[in-house]
Structures are given as C-alpha cells and as structure tokens.
Image (cartoon, grey):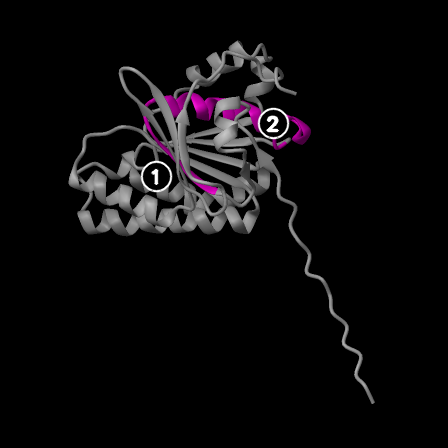
Amino acid sequence: MQKLVLQTTPQTTTKLQLTFNIPTLDELFPAFHTGDFAVLYGSENVTSLLSQLCIRAHLPTEQGGLNSNTIFIDAANSSSMSNILQTIEHHQLDPQKTIEHIQTFRAYTAYRLQSLIIEKLEQTIKTSKAKLVIISDIMCPFLTETIDEQETRTAYNQIINYLSNFAKKHNIIIIATNLPHENTTRNKTLHDITTTKTGIILRLIKTQYSSDIELEKHPSYMLGIMDFKPENKLLTDFY
C-alpha cells in the first residue's frame, strides 16, 4: 500500500522595501528590504540620507515607503531633529504630522545604548508598529577611553549581532551610521567588527572635487562605486 505524503508549503514573510528615491543612488542600491541590517559610514552626508529615509518610511509602499513609523536612536547627538525638520520643510510636508511618525530616543553612553537596544527595542517595535529603526553614529558611545577595551569589544559585538538577528526576526529594516571620528586603534577595532558582522555596507566618500558612494558589501546586489549627486527634488517627483 502506497503512503500518501502531504507536503505543506512554508509560509513566507512579505518583504517590504524602502528606497532613497535618488536616481543616481537607486541605480547602485535599489532598495533596503525588511529583514536587512545595514551600516552607512563615511562623510557627514550620511546624516542627510538618514533624514530622507526617516520621512520616506511613512509613505505608502507603492511610493517606495514602508507605510510605517520610524524609531530614531541618536547615539551621539549626531543628527539633531533640526536636520530632519529641514528635510521635512524642503519636501513641503506637514511638520507636525510627519514628526508624529518618528519616535526619537537619545543614548549618549554605551550602557544607555545597550539598554535601549537589548532591553527595550522589542517592546518599542510592538507598541509603535515601526518597520524602520535608525541608529545614528552607533560606534560613538564606545569610543570613550572610560570603558575598558575588552568590555567595549564584547558589548559592541553583542549589539551588532543582536541587531542583525533582530531585523530578521521582526521583519524590519535597521540602519546604523558611523560618522567620521579620530582614527584610533579602538575606532579601527570597532569598524572591523561592524564590517565583519554586517551584511550591507554603504560608504560615502567626499573629497575636494567629488562625492561618491560605494556599495562595499551586500548579499545579492552587485558591488560598485559611482558619483553621488543627490538631486534637489521633492519626495513625490519620481512617482
């Protein structure tokens, strides 16, 4: 007698995507997808890109947004709300309504940042239903010499691993930045941890004569570098 084997197709989680909506950049990097943990580093221009993503996240999915709130964690007073407000003003959006979609936290010490991420982030995601988490200058609180070197490496490594797993588990996008800091041994150590543990890395390079963006690491997109020339257009100009 032949046995009948019933096979069930596992349920797949719908992946949403978030675009920069900047033609030159979208050509190199089409979109972030839910489940991604990415790091942007290099020039101060990463701050402007984060402001753009903050306010794009609540746009409808058909416009390259996530139809969702954003959690913004400022780890070093590196991206003040004024920068986001300037971006909102440029795009001719209602400041009050737009800010309502962005929940902000400040974490100027490594211990506070670790607590926010590991102890409170999950509940905050459930409460806010956010699909985007941005952590501005994630490395900065760990660069202080008041924290032991080994303790710094252990805690930072724990946070990076946690965020990578957290993004996949909760089907959200997490984007962290590293801004320019003094080129110390500790800075290099933490940067090496970041590049090793993170699946997606974008680098902004600014010189006296040019601005470039490089896709250094990605599990599926083709890596490369190209001129970065953000166009002074509104959020809805490319729909």
Q: Judge from the rendering whether residue 154 lies leftward or rightward of residue 214; answer left or right.
A: left
Range covered by the magenta-colored residues: 37-66
Q: Is residue 114 above or below residue 88?
A: below
> Residue 15 falls in which quadrant of the image?
top right
In this rendering, which labeled residue sits more in front, label 1 or label 2?
A: 2
Q: Horizontal and vertical percent for residue 10?
A: 68, 60
Residue tagged 1:
112
Which element is circle 1 on? helix
Where is residue 233 drawn, in percent x and y?
Answer: 54, 12
Q: Which residue is mark 2?
A: 58
Contact between labelled residues 2 and 1, with CB atoms less than 8 Å apart: no
Q: Is residue 128 visible to us here?
A: no
Density class for disc 1 (Cα within 10 Å; few <14, some 14-19, many ≥20) is: few
Q: Amino acid at mark 1?
A: Arg
Mark found first going from the N terminus, 1 or 2: 2
x 66%, y 53%: residue: 12
Quadrant location of the C terminus in the rendered image? top right
What is the x, y in percent for residue 42? 32, 29
Residue 22 lies in the magenta-colored region? no
Residue 166 falls left or right of residue 136: right
Q: How many marks?
A: 2
